[in-house]
């Protein structure tokens, strides 16, 4: 089913994002993790796509198995990096033939070891071009990414918002935000988009902190920031992993409660292929009656 239709049913969506593992053992473990989430009835599960298509086969295999064997709606990420239009056409055909109905269209990050995005000859330079390409040739539901605190490469937040408006204008159905830890950034982001005439749903992306050093690396890479009070609590917990996870779960739960109560269309959890923290946050939200 198209995610855009699922977002119109009046209930907040809950979704989980995973990345393809490198080994067969990791693949089997991930499928078990996803299957364990089925009783929670997530709206959909998404699967990332390695730089330069490095996990292409596994991404297609995993979304197919998640939808057709486990029985959960699955969305495949697809990037412009390292692909010609002909290759993108082939990948999209594989996804269509596997019964996948939703794609997250991304420009993608430069391959490991490279610092600057370079378009493939015969390919695309921007996610908006990929969105239009998908719209012209396939019947997928199409999502795109948005950055509440600005894409690290964007000249300004205004410039970044204009790029996002273009992606929606060319056919995107919904937006999934990059992770953030201050809800004020999300609400300001959505308000500015609405002022610009962008009406597409913006699903906030949430990642419960489970490792302090790890989240510092992630925020440095994606341009997000950690609130001073949260950072102070994490630093105070030091190497106590259980304490860090507890702080992360509490902060993420508080974020989600406010987001949903103030009208966010759902929550997209960045799981890092681990379900424990996101499962706990989900159960707390369910207990509070804000998700079903």
Image (cartoon, rainbow, N blue to C red):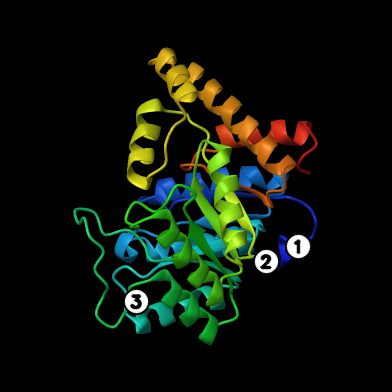
Q: Name the residue under label 3.
A: 124
Q: Residues within 10 Å of mark 2 (few under 14, many from 20)?
A: some
Q: Could you give the CA–CA distance between mark 2 and mark 1, rounded to whole angstroms?
A: 7 Å
Q: In this view, does 42 lie above or below 240?
A: below
Give the SS element for disc 3.
loop
Q: Could you give the CA–CA distance between mark 2 and mark 3, rounded to whole angstroms?
A: 25 Å
Q: Is residue 283 above or below residue 110?
A: above
Instruction: Tell me the quarter of the image containing the N terminus.
Output: bottom right
Task: Examine the image and state in which quarter residue 32 appears.
Answer: top right
Q: Mark 1 points at which residue?
A: 8
* Residue sitting at x 50%, y 41%: 180
Q: Residues within 10 Å of mark 1 (few under 14, many from 20)?
A: few
Give the SS element for disc 2.
helix
Asked if marks 2 and 3 touch (Cβ < 8 Å), the reply is: no
Q: Name the residue under label 2.
A: 4
Q: Residue 67, position in %: x, y?
A: 62, 62
Q: Nearer the viewer, residue 284 or 8?
A: 8
Judge whether residue 99 can be spotted in this image. yes
Marked residue nearer the N-terminal end (3 or 1): 1
Give the SS element for disc 1.
loop
Asked if marks 2 and 1 touch (Cβ < 8 Å), the reply is: yes
Judge whether residue 241 can be spotted in this image. no
Marked residue nearer the N-terminal end (2 or 3): 2
Relative placement, left or right, of 210 versus 107 is: right
Instruction: Tell me the quarter of the image containing the C terminus.
Output: top right
Q: Residue 284, position in %: x, y?
A: 70, 30
């Amino acid at each position: 089913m198209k995610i855009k239709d699922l977002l119109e049913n009046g209930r907040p969506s809950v979704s989980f994002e995973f990345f393809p593992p490198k080994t067969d053992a990791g693949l089997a473990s991930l499928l078990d993790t996803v299957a364990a989430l089925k009783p929670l009835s997530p709206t959909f599960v998404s699967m990332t796509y390695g730089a330069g298509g490095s996990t292409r086969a596994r991404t297609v295999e995993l979304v197919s198995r998640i939808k057709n064997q486990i029985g959960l709606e699955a969305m495949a990420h697809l990037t412009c990096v390292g692909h010609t239009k002909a290759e993108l056409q082939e990948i999209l055909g594989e996804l269509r033939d596997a019964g996948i109905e939703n794609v997250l269209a991304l420009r993608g990050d430069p391959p490991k070891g490279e610092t600057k995005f370079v378009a493939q000859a015969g390919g695309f330079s921007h996610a908006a071009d990929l969105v239009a390409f998908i719209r012209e040739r396939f019947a997928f539901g199409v999502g795109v990414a948005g950055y509440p605190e600005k894409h690290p490469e964007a000249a300004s937040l205004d410039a970044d918002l204009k790029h996002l408006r273009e992606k929606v204008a060319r056919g995107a159905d919904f937006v999934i935000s990059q992770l953030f830890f201050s809800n004020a950034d999300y609400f300001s982001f959505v308000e500015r988009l609405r002022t610009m005439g962008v009406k597409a749903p913006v699903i906030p992306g949430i990642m419960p902190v489970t490792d302090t050093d790890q989240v510092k690396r992630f925020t440095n890479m994606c341009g997000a920031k950690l609130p001073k009070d949260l950072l102070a609590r994490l630093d105070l917990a030091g190497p106590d992993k259980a304490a860090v996870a507890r702080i992360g779960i509490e902060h993420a739960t508080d974020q989600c409660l406010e987001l949903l109560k103030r009208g966010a269309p759902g929550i997209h959890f960045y799981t890092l292929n681990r379900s424990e923290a996101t499962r706990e946050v989900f159960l707390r939200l369910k207990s509070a009656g804000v998700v079903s």
